[in-house]
Amino acid sequence: MQKILATSLLLINLLASNTYAQTQLQYKLKIGDSILVHQQANQKITQDIDGIMQQMTNVLESKFVLVVKKVTDSSYILDFNYKLFKLLSSSNTYGEIFSIDTSADFEKDNMEAAIFSGLTQSKLKIELLKTGKIIAVRGTTQLINNMMERAGIQDEFTKQIMIEEMKKEFGSKSLSDSFEQFTFIYPTKKVVVNESWKNDFTGEIESENIWTLKAVSPNIDIQGVAHVSINSVEENYNMVLNGDQKTHISADVKTGVVKTMSVTSKTRGNTVSLQNNSIKIPTTINSVTTYKTKLYVQ
């Protein structure tokens, strides 16, 4: 009898301990909360063209602010706007290809700089589930119009072509896919330490993610691994790459807001030229992206 009682008490304690250890990971925000995000990304694209290695480097830096404007039972409505956008592209063959810095003055004939200066003059609305999945991004049409107005293009046909190109990067779907790389990290169910869950990112860059909760104190510590595929279709080429990605996240326990995130990926495959007899060019992309945030709560 004593053994049965002891076993029963042990099972009760284990069940109670397991229940207590379960955590509902999610965003817990209030109206007026604001998040300043600093993103930095370094990307190296290497291509083997007839035995000659061509390398292009992209260095991106951006700062943006998210402000909670409305809270529903399942989601948040956020105001979003860029404070800074910098992009430097260069290659070992051509040197600097282009440089964009919205915080600096630019020459009047620098069309790229003029276009991107419109980013910091626009505001978007984002609806975010408590898991971090993005339901909608609104205001992208006005964002693109603001960017195009600064280009000073008079020819309507040329303007419409450029608008269609801009939609690929700054349309609602494209921005939603891009932002989710930073926000969509939490499961729909409660989890315990060392438990894993899955989600998928879609778009031009797709990934099948497995997240694992490593700790809940003093911060939420999450590690992620993923299979990544890139399928970029352009007018003159198709790029098809596959590879792996590793992510480490440290988030605030009270709000669920990411404090720091690092994402490292390596993909390999081919770029297929559509103008030159469908020649396959071996291509590798290595990238490291980091996010750091400052949270201001109401």
Image (tube, rainbow, N blue to C red):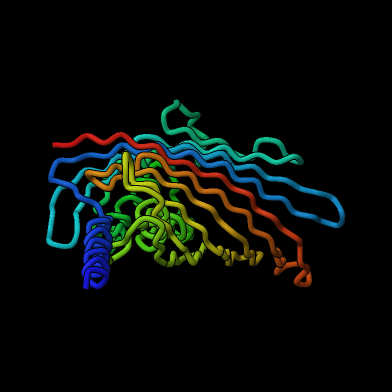
Name which residue lies at 71% across and 58% down: 283
Q: Is residue 113 visible?
A: no
Residue 121: name its quadrant.
Answer: top left
As rendered, which of 250 and 196 lies closer to the eye? 196
Q: Is residue 294 left or right of residue 162?
A: left
Q: What percent of the width, then of the height, locates residue 157?
A: 46, 60
Which quarter of the image is occupied by the C terminus? top left
For the residue pair 273 and 58, the one nearer the viewer reads as 58
Residue at coordinates 21% horizontally, 61% vertically from top-left? Answer: 16
The correct choice, above or below, for 171 with respect to 151 in the image is below
Query: Camera-side residue: 25 or 50?
Result: 25
Q: Position of residue 116 (x, y in %)?
A: 43, 41
187 to 215, vertically: above or below: below
Quarter of the rendering occupied by the N terminus: bottom left
- Name the residue at the right extreme: 51
Find residue 23 and report its image quarter.
bottom left
Task: Answer left or right for 279 relative to 72.
Answer: right
Q: How many marks?
A: 0
In the image, taking residue 107 as reference, residue 236 lies left or right, namely right
Instruction: Locate residue 229, reporting x and y percent.
Output: 57, 65
For image coordinates 23% across by 45% down, the residue present is: 255
Image coordinates of residue 44 in percent, x first then y, are: 65, 46
The residue shown at (42%, 41%) is 291
- Compare residues 230 and 184 and report the one nearer the observer: 184
In the displayed image of the protein, which residue is found farthest to the top? 105
Q: Is residue 33 visible?
A: yes
